[in-house]
Amino acid sequence: MLQILVMLLQFHKTVTIEKLAALFPQPIKFESRRRSLQRFLSLPQLSIKLLWFPVLKRWVKISKYKKGKRLTLALDRTQWRDQNIFVISLIEDRRAIPIYWLSLAKRGCSNLREQKELIRPVIRLFKGYQLLVLGDREFHSVKLANWLDTKGIDFVLRQKQATYIQSKDYQCQPLQALGLKPGISLFIQDIQATKQKGFGKFNLAAYYPQKYRGKLEPSGWYLLTNLKRFNAAIMAFKLRSGIEAMFKDCKTGGYNLESTHATAQRLMALILLIVIAYSCAVLAGRHSRKIGLQKYLARLQELKRTARRHSSFWIGLYGHLWVGAMEFWSEMANALMRLKPHKLPYFHKGLRAMTLIQSAF
């Protein structure tokens, strides 16, 4: 049933229970299908730790990550209708793969207790790896920084401009008093990042990119970190943008999670299905790029466009849809090919590409 639901998500890009019930391939009444899905999504076996953690651990083990290597993790929170979801993701190849998530029984930002609750299982999961945690301004707390440092975890946490710092070269002052302007960067070591006493000293990487193609960032970055080099902190924090792309893919850009009205428990199960489907699509898209099949799935070039047109997620998702359409309408597709005998060599190459794309799933 899990496999069928993941495939339905890939083909129809919806997590609404009503629509999934309408599409679910079982010869029973609609209401029976709907109730069957509701019971399935309430099963305790649909647990992140029981089902998803072993898959992630295996995937990391067989990939390029060996024990002792660094894994980059990003913290973020998003509001899906009335659900406040707190997520930690693995940043890999400019994309975020969700690892663990919590539903917060409130609106607004997370606190230190909830942040620890989210991070602790991931520390245990990736024991033996060097971890680097990235966080935007919601996670500016020096208490979080201090806790991560005591756990031996590297971090880069963006600070609010009102945060006070103090060092041997700078008196106690808010970050905005540094006068950061476009094109300016600073790296201040051994700062005290709050007026409160009892916290360790860290480093501050301040960076304000220059105007690019007529666009200027509204403000610079003030990054609290225990990394020793400016470039390492800046390059690491830039990777955080992958989690924003992931949220878009799970919402309007992919599976339309915001359309569901499921209860909290079923929503968490639906997010698990989305994460499995999303990860499969991303990995399949990377596989298609690696073996040079993206030309069958998307435009490779576009006039006056420097960035690639489609992500690995898009390539993987629509590659699957293309193969599925060929199988569903195989009789008509074969009849159409027979009308074009002069194109037969190209059809053979395309069918071979379809077989390779399908193997990725």
Image (cartoon, rainbow, N blue to C red):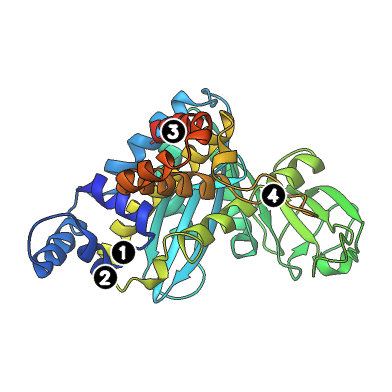
Query: Which residue is depicted at the point 56% across and 28% down?
Result: 291
Q: How crowded is mark 2: few (under 14 residues within 10 Å), some or many (20 or more)?
A: few
Expressed as whole percent of the image width and height from the top left, the position of residue 44 reads: 19, 52
Marker disc for residue 313: none
Question: Helix, strand or loop at disc 4?
Answer: helix
Q: Earlier in the sequence, mark 1 or mark 3?
A: 1
Q: Which of marks 3 and 2 is nearer the N terminus?
A: 2
Per the image, the residue denoted by label 1 is: 267
Three-letter amino acid code of the residue under disc 3: Leu
Per the image, the residue denoted by label 4 is: 237
Cα gap from disc 4 to disc 1, whole angstroms: 30 Å
Three-letter amino acid code of the residue under disc 2: Thr
Cα gap from disc 3 to disc 4, whole angstroms: 42 Å
Question: Helix, strand or loop at disc 2?
Answer: loop
Q: Earlier in the sequence, mark 3 or mark 4?
A: 4
Q: Is residue 35 left or right of residue 123?
A: left
Per the image, the residue denoted by label 3 is: 351
Circle 2 or circle 4, nearest the eye: 2
Q: In this view, does 226 lie to the left or right of 70?
A: right
Query: Which residue is depicted at the point 67% across and 63% down?
Result: 196
Q: Residues within 10 Å of mark 3 (few under 14, many from 20)?
A: few
Question: Helix, strand or loop at disc 3?
Answer: helix
**From this viewpoint, is residue 100 visible?**
yes
Mark 2 and 1 residues: CB-CB less than 8 Å, in contact? yes
Cα gap from disc 1 to disc 3, whole angstroms: 38 Å
Cα gap from disc 3 to disc 2, whole angstroms: 43 Å
Expressed as whole percent of the image width and height from the top left, the position of residue 263 reads: 26, 70
